[in-house]
Image (cartoon, rainbow, N blue to C red):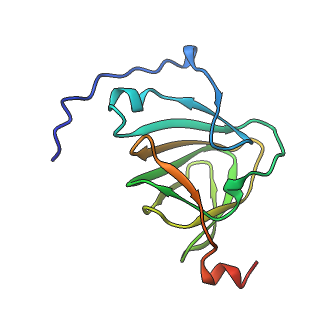
């Protein structure tokens, strides 16, 4: 087990929450302080729909260069397509554990969509990629 003694205690108060723009044009993000407390080992944020109807690159096939990514749906629904897994609709109370670098894309989401996402490392990159061969036949 890795030594985590370099981590700090964290406490993110809802009363002091700041919602900011992030990776997605249609979402706003609340940082939960995990990236700072873990010195960048993990990031945790709440992501919610902001009411915009804008399309963005993440609706294209993409990957996240990370070691761990978990999404827990707090509200609403979204449909994603995952390489080798087909389309999956996630709803309130559902969890997705994405394996590292799995190709995926968002198909649609509700205007009340809200999730808790935990990713490692905190400074992961998102890259647009070609569609998997099986998906190209269905597009």
Residue 88: which quarter of the image? bottom right
**Above or below, 14 relative to 38:** above
Task: Describe residue 30's horizontal placement relative to residue 77 as left or right.
Answer: left
Front one among 40 and 9: 40
x%, y% of residue 106? 68, 59
**In which quadrant will I find the C terminus?**
bottom right
Task: Describe residue 28's horizontal placement relative to residue 1 as left or right.
Answer: right
Task: Describe residue 133's horizontal placement relative to residue 9 as left or right.
Answer: right
Rendered residue at 67%/44% (across/down): 24
Task: Describe residue 118's horizontal placement relative to residue 10 as left or right.
Answer: right
Rendered residue at 56%/36% (across/down): 46
Residue 86: which quarter of the image? bottom right
**Above or below, 35 relative to 111:** above
**Above or below, 45 relative to 90:** above
Rendered residue at 80%/37% (across/down): 51
Number of numbered discs visible in the structure rendering: 0
x%, y% of residue 90? 62, 57
Give the residue at the far right of this rendering: 53
Rendered residue at 56%/73% (across/down): 83
**Above or below, 15 relative to 47:** above
x%, y% of residue 3? 16, 38
x%, y% of residue 122? 42, 40
């Amino acid at each position: 087990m890795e030594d985590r003694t370099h981590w700090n205690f964290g406490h993110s108060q809802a009363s002091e929450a700041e919602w900011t723009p992030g990776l997605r044009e249609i979402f706003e993000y609340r940082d939960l302080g995990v990236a700072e407390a873990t010195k960048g080992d993990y990031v945790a944020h709440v992501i919610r729909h902001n009411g915009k109807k804008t399309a963005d690159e993440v609706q294209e096939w993409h990957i996240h260069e990370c070691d761990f990514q978990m999404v827990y749906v707090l509200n609403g629904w979204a449909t994603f397509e995952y390489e080798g897994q087909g389309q999956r609709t996630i709803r309130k109370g559902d969890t997705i554990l994405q394996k590292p670098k799995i190709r995926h894309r968002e198909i649609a989401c509700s205007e009340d969509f809200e999730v808790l996402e935990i990713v490692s490392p905190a400074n992961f990159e998102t890259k647009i990629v070609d569609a998997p061969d099986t998906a190209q036949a269905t597009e």
